[in-house]
Image (cartoon, rainbow, N blue to C red):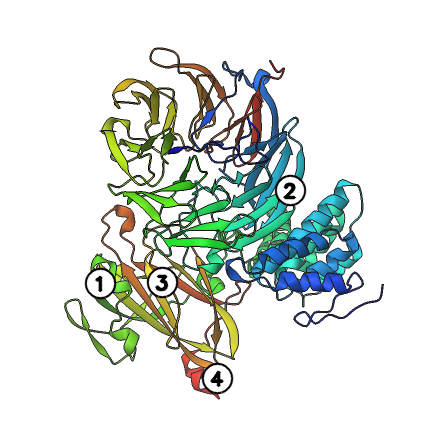
Amino acid sequence: MASVALGLGGISLGQAADGEFARAVATLRAVGGEGQGNEAAGQALHRLAKGSPESIPALLESMDGANPFASNYLRGAVEVIAGNTLAKGGALPLVELGEFLLNKSHDTKPRAMAFDLIRRADAEAAERLVPGLLSDPSVDLRREAVTRLLGQAEGLAKADNKPGAVLLYRQALDAARDLDQIQRISAELRELGRKVDLTRHFGFLIDWEVVGPFHNKGRAGFAEVFGPEKDAGLGAEYAGLEGKVGWKKYSTDDEYGMVDFNEPYGALKEVTGYAQTEFISASDRPAELRLGCKNAWKIWLNGELVFGRDEYHRGMRIDQYQLPVQLRKGANTILVKACQNEQKEEWTVQWQFQLRVCDATGTAIHSLPKKNAEVAAK
Amino acid sequence: MIVALAGSAAGVFAGDWTGFRGPLGNGLSDEVGLPVKLSAEKHVAWKTALPGKGLSSPLVVGDRVYVTASGGTRQDRLQILCLNAADGSVIWKRQFWVMGSTMCHKKTSVAAPTPVTDGKLLFAIFSSNDLFCLDLDGNLKWLRGLTVDYPNARNSLGMASSLVLAGDVLVAQVENDSESFVAGLNKTTGGNLWKIDRPKSANWTTATVRRDKAGQEQVLLQSGKGIHAVNSASGKVEWHYADGAATIPSSALAGEMLFVPSHGLTALKLGADGKSFEQKWRSGRLRPGTASPLVHGRKVYSLNNAGVLACADVDSGNRLWQLRLDGPFGGSPVVADNHMYIFSEEGLAQVVDLTAPEGNVVGKMDLGEMIQCSPAVSNGALFVRSNGHIWKISRKTRL
């Protein structure tokens, strides 16, 4: 069968492609929200799931740039083909899967799936690929390589080769993006007498200007537009809960970048606070704002509302919310609104958030020094 | 006239366990001959490792067992498995990428809600509000990402309401502090038939379904605002019991009576017209904990958070006896052949003889792992799962 180029978001499908295949893939990629296109997708998936194992790399490739619905549909086809093939003692196209995995221009999820398929078919082949995954854009693939390094570092530590262990742990920390691995590595390094700057590793923003308190009576403050949402100029004054309030500097020394409104304002209830900071980006670029917060919150970038959520005290963790944004070269203003509610239980005292800027893999993006803002803008 | 749902969808056979708390959603099974004096050596027919965590209940259709799990470091791999009920071998496994939030309390997991089946299609939802419809051979038919569609529909503690089927309408209860709703979906395509706003408050209960003689279903939605009876075809509220209700244990329907975890336990007699209800009794002494109440014969059973099982008269609510069990309990009990089966979070299976004058624990078996699911009962066996395994418990030689 001749190779056919298909106009599916710029992708080019390989030898397994034909017109019917392409139409089926296009149908899946067209699935939208609220179940739009589901009916046609089910039929298209039925067609694709009958494919041979040789069609798997093309199916993986067709996930590039696909929305999450389409990716899962396409995954459904791969799952059936691979499952049936392996159940019958058949072989998966290891070389093509490996080549797909190693081509980092493909999306991270299908590449990670390719690795999983290789591992199912030939665990030793998968293991040989692991060392090359240490700086992979896929967090899942990176994790494999970090796990391997951790094992080696522990071996050196047990053999009393501390310098060797420290250097391997440093390599592992540089690559690690999962919280559990980062915490484990940092604990090992500290045990070995080395310093670890977790705040910088994660890229938490620690220097802020804060203003408050405003009211949140009956949880109405979340929707109310207070002064900082209209004019966030640092010289501005606003009508606060008990008179005029203005911005004041706040820096956190918490390792995980916690901005705690209870520190400047006391453990208040039914209140709203704002924090803003300036982030100097070296370039126009996509990024993620990653927020952890157990209060109701809203966040703006350069005056544009990114997202908001009115949930209180249901839990908090690092990277709880991952918000894709576009940074502009030079100064970017980030404004956070955090609302505290009326609950009185011990576990509802927190009025705080933590925020970092990173890329899609979770790699920290650091702000340039403020003195560079003008230079960067040029 | 409205009667309790008879659970007779095509493809479902007597003895199948098709959803949360069974085909009728009431925890009752007509199985007989289940083991009573439990022994791991005699009664663990098989034990199979699961690839991910979960506290959803297994389902059983014919000779196959279906169970969900969530794998990966971030629980972002949503898994649906089909096992051979005879030997526990995995017949197929499907894995999908999470589309919503995986954040949840450490005691729960992304595979918290129980799937439902009509005997031909399997519908599985996860705490991330990702919903998949597969045929029983593992072929994906359609999917939804409800948090992709409605971005503030999530709960940082985790979601847990199980799906229910009301005829051809699949009901997804997605109630939380922010974008809170219930959707009636076309079970064939997954598209919205209706979507109604719900109280903005976290809720982990599962709906109950009634069906009238004409085949029209009514969905009884429980929340902190009480019970809303919703027409399954239109999503319109037909009556509202507004005196509040619990947000963890679910109501139990028995004939014309609905037993609601509200101010303890409140018994409502549901009107034959489907438009009204009448409160018959209320007892603060029958307050259920996490486990949902259960009605068997003329008695109602309620298990509180201290592990005390209370038995009361179904007509009056008068407490008849109470029995302390070894808790705590994260799942709900089931009853088969006059025996109640309940698994504690410590992994201790306990069997209560309900014919004894004040109940009697007649069997115990330690499975050694935390169990938070409600067991499934089918074909002479119990099926129960932990975060790591699924067990079949039965007499190894059938009666």
Task: Name the mark nearer the viewer: 2 or 1.
Answer: 2
Rate crowding at label 2 as few (under 14), some (14 to 19) or many (20 or more) other CA atoms within 10 Å: some
Secondary structure category for the residue under label 1: helix
Q: Are marks 4 and 3 in contact (CB under 8 Å)?
A: no
Task: Name the mark nearer the viewer: 2 or 4.
Answer: 2
Secondary structure category for the residue under label 3: loop
CA–CA distance in space, label 2 to label 4: 52 Å
Residue A307, numbered label: none
Residue located beneath label 4 in the image:
A376
Residue located beneath label 1 in the image:
A265
Q: Quadrant of residue A333?
A: bottom left
Q: Quadrant of residue A279?
A: bottom left
Q: Are marks 4 and 1 in contact (CB under 8 Å)?
A: no
Q: Position of residue B116 (x, y in %)?
A: 52, 39
A372 vs B163: above or below: below
**Among all residues in the image, which is located at the extreme top?**
B357
For the residues tagged 2 and 1, is the chain the same?
no
* Res A188 visible: yes
The amino acid type, in three-letter code, at marker 2 is: Lys
Q: Position of residue B274 (x, y in %)?
A: 34, 39
**Among all residues in the image, which is located at the extreme left?**
A243
CA–CA distance in space, label 2 to label 1: 53 Å
Residue located beneath label 2 in the image:
B93
Residue A253, numbered label: 3
For the residues tagged 4 and 3, is the chain the same?
yes
- Mark 2 chain: B
The amino acid type, in three-letter code, at marker 3 is: Asp
- Mark 4 chain: A
